Every structure is written in C-alpha cells, then in structure tokens.
C-alpha cells in the first residue's frame, strides 16, 4: 500500500496543560486536559483538527476556506482564526439571522476577517446548513477562488488525526505524572474528536497489546449529528487508514452517552449549570452551556453512579467554548 502523506501546519500551542482536579465525590481523581488553551483564536479543540485540515488545504493549492456551523460555532470562529494566520480568506455559513450586534464567536470571526453568511436556518438544521455550504463552495469555485470546503465541526478523517495525536499526548502526560488514565471523557457533537481519540487508542493498543488503556467516553450534546457508535467507528477506521495503521476499531471501542444532552443541542440543562459552577469553583475552569458544561455534567453524573470506581484516574478534555459565554443569541 502506498504511504499516505499527511500535511500539517502549526496552529496550536501544544502540548496543552494537564491539571490535577483533585478528588471527585467517588474518591477518584480528576484531571483537566486544557484543550481550551490550544492558543489559536482564543483556543478550543478545533485547533488540533485545523492543523491537518489546513495542511491538506495548502497541499491542494487552496486559496480560501469555507466552513459551516451553528450561530455560535466555535469551529467556525477557529477556522476564521486559521484563515487569518494562513492568509486564506474565510467564509462561514452560520445558522440564524444577522444579529443587530455581533457577539461571542461571531464577533471574533469578524475580527479575524472572515465573511459571515447568515442563512436564517435553525441551529439544528444540519442538512440545510450543509446544503448551503455546498452551494457557496460551488459559487466560489466558479469565481476562481479555489476554496477548501470543510464540513460541520471539521469532522473528517483528516481532521480527526489531530485527536489521534492528542491521545498520545494525554497518555504521555499521565505517564509523566506516574499514572495510567482509566477513562477519558469529553463532549461529542460532530464526532471528529471522538473518532480521533478512538483511532489513537487503537494505534496504542496495536503498539503495546499489554498496556492498560483508558475507556473513551463521549458525552453527546446534539441529536442528529454523529451519535452512532457505527459512524464514529467508521470515521476512526478511516483515520487509522490515513495514519497507515492496519489495526481497526470496533464499535466496542466507542462509548457515547446521550443522557446529559437535555432535550437537544444548545437547550440548557440544570445539570450543566451545576457542573459549570462546580468547575468554576474548583479550578476556575470556565465551561460553556452548549458543549463543555454538558460534557462535564456527564462526567460528574457517571462518577455519581460510581461508573469509574473509587480509585480511578479520570481525564476530562476541556474542549473550549469560552466565547459563547459572551453571547446572548
Ligand atoms: C467547545 C466544543 N466542545 C466540543 C465540541 C465537539 O467536538 P466534535 O464536533 O469533534 O464532536 C465542539 C464542536 O463544535 C465544541 O465547539
């Protein structure tokens, strides 16, 4: 098989810190992996994906970027930041109407110089948003702007490579602190973070079948996106393929817990509000209501059910989302 060439640009400040979060109610130890501090455009998980997505774009001669997301999409804001860093004009397809005053992620995206396309579509109309992206991409091609068009959340196999490497980074940091993590918990939505971590796990298992490796647990926050074990497994296997790995993930490697989402994407839950307060008071960690607070409420909920045991090391990946704290829409 021909070796795949993986192109990468440097956008993130790595490794991100791994902070000791003290004891959970069960007695297990919590670790906070600060992927909110990846550096690019005020940080978040997408910086790791964008290093590979943009590497691919440049390798293919792209002259502009296009992507899509909800009105307060962190992925869109970070793509705008990547576009600014790389000198690529960036178009963002967003749900909702143009607000009277831009806030949070939209304000930052504008500051980074992106063109915002307000579609008037609902936050959860993923299909409609993707259709709009496809149409805009075709228009940019026709205008000779050579777009590199990135699907929602940057959750392709290329993007997921970023989290296969993040898995190695976490294991190495834990090892430096003299422990093996028992679980890695994080917020999952479009699935690229999850698929990448699973690819990293499978690769590590192939390297050392005797090593004790953590369970990978995604806390789902959006109905209608990649919430099936099958689709995450398939994306993880595509990622392994790009990494020239012959080992494969199975659905057994994928755990998605949808019980902390509330009624749907971006709908507030009391558990997330409580989890955000817990994290702010424990470590001055700022969690947003749409993503990271729901993910962390999952970790606290699983701990309350004693799912990790009483002597485990549990890593929470803080995937970012800070700017939406400063937005009302
Ligand atoms: C702050 C934050 N956390 C988690 C996620 C979920 O990551 P993924 O889309 O890779 O599942 C996102 C995605 O937009 C996000 O913005």
Image (cartoon, grey):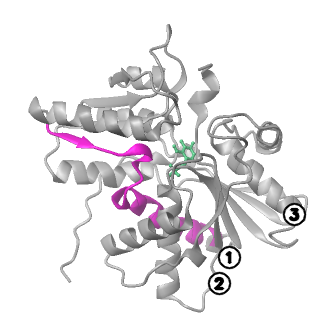
- For the residues labelled 2 and 3, the Cα–Cα distance comes to 23 Å
Magenta residues, as a range? 146-174
Disc 3 to disc 1, C-alpha distance: 22 Å
Left or right of residue 145: residue 218: right
**Residue 311 visible (yes or no):** yes
Q: Nearer the viewer, residue 158 or 261?
A: 261
Magenta stretch encompasses residue 257? no
Instruction: Please tell me whether mark 2 or mark 3 is closer to you in this view.
Output: 3
Q: Position of residue 89 (x, y in %)?
A: 24, 30
Quadrant position of residue 30: bottom right
Q: Residue at left 79%, top 72%?
A: 312
> For the point 79% across and 36% down, which residue is it?
273
Look at the magenta stretch and give its main secondary structure. helix
- Residue 327: percent from left, percent from top: 60, 21
Residue picked out by circle 2: 212
Q: Quadrant of residue 253?
A: bottom right
On the image, numbered disc 3 is attached to which residue? 305
Q: Residue at the location (58% across, 70% down)?
A: 254
Frontmost residue, 176 versus 79: 79
Counting other residues with Cα less than 10 Å from the Cα at mark 1, is it few (<14), some (14-19), or many (20 or more)?
A: many
Task: Give x and y (percent) for residue 113.
Answer: 32, 23
Q: Which badge, 2 or 3, is on the more N-terminal residue?
A: 2
| Residue located beneath label 1 in the image | 180
């Amino acid at each position: 098989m021909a070796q795949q060439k993986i192109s990468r640009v440097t956008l993130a400040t790595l490794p991100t810190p791994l902070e000791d979060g003290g004891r959970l109610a069960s007695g297990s130890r919590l670790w906070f992996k600060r992927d909110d501090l990846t550096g690019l455009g005020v940080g978040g998980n997408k910086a790791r994906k964008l290093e590979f997505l943009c590497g691919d774009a440049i390798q293919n001669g792209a002259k502009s970027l296009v992507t899509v997301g909800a009105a307060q999409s962190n992925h869109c804001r970070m793509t705008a930041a990547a576009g600014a860093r790389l000198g690529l004009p960036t178009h963002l397809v967003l749900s909702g109407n143009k607000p009277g005053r831009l806030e949070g992620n939209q304000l930052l995206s504008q500051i980074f110089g992106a063109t915002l396309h307000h579609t008037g579509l609902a936050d959860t109309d993923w299909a409609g948003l993707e259709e709009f992206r496809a149409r805009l991409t075709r228009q940019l091609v026709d205008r000779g702007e050579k777009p590199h068009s990135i699907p929602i959340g940057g959750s392709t196999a290329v993007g997921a490579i970023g989290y296969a490497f993040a898995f190695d980074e976490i294991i190495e940091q834990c090892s430096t602190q003299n422990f093996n993590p028992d679980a890695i918990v994080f917020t999952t939505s479009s699935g690229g973070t999850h698929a990448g971590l699973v690819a990293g796990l499978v690769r590590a298992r192939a390297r050392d079948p005797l090593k004790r490796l953590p369970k990978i647990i995604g806390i789902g926050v959006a109905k209608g996106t990649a919430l099936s074990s099958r689709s995450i497994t398939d994306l993880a296997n595509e990622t392994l393929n790009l990494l020239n790995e012959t080992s494969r993930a199975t659905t057994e490697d994928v755990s998605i817990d949808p019980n902390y989402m509330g009624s749907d994407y971006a709908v507030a839950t009391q558990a997330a509000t409580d989890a955000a307060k817990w994290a702010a008071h424990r470590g001055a960690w700022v969690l947003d209501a749409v993503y990271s607070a729901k993910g962390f409420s999952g970790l606290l909920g699983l701990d309350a059910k004693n799912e990790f045991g009483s002597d485990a090391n549990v890593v929470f990946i803080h995937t970012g989302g800070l700017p939406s704290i400063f937005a009302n829409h």
